[in-house]
Image: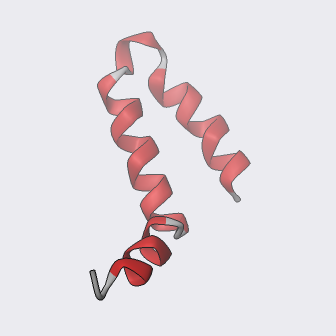
């Protein structure tokens, strides 16, 4: 695919990773997903 390298670059961006982790946290909100999300945000920086 011609834009494969660009897609990998986007997938490694901070915004993409934050969005992915936020979706995981919202799916597990009853297990403390948002608390875990705050720790992951600090680790990603």
Task: State the residue at coordinates (59%, 38%).
Answer: 38
Occupied quadrant, residue 21: top left
Q: Residue lying furthest front in this view? A: 1
Residue farthest bottom in this picture: 2
* Colour approach in the figure: secondary structure
**18 w.r.t. 4: above or below:** above
Q: Nearer the viewer, residue 12 or 5?
A: 5
Give the x, y percent position of residue 9: 49, 77
39 above or below 29? below
| Foreground residue among 12 and 14 | 12
Report the residue at 47% width, 30% height from top.
34
Quarter of the picture holding the C terminus: bottom right
Q: Nearer the viewer, residue 34 or 6?
A: 6
Lateral position of residue 39 relative to residue 11, left or right: right
Whole-percent x, y for residue 28 in the image: 37, 20
Residue at image position (55%, 26%) is: 35
The number of numbered badges drawn on the structure is 0
Q: Residue at x 31, y 85 (%)?
A: 3
Image coordinates of residue 26 in percent, x first then y, are: 33, 31
* Residue 37 vertical position relative to residue 17 in the rendered view, above or below: above
Q: Quadrant of the N terminus?
A: bottom left
């Amino acid at each position: 695919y011609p834009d494969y390298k660009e897609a990998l670059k986007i997938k490694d961006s901070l915004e993409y990773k934050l969005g992915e982790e936020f979706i995981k946290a919202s799916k597990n909100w009853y297990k403390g997903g948002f608390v875990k999300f705050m720790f992951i945000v600090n680790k990603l920086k």
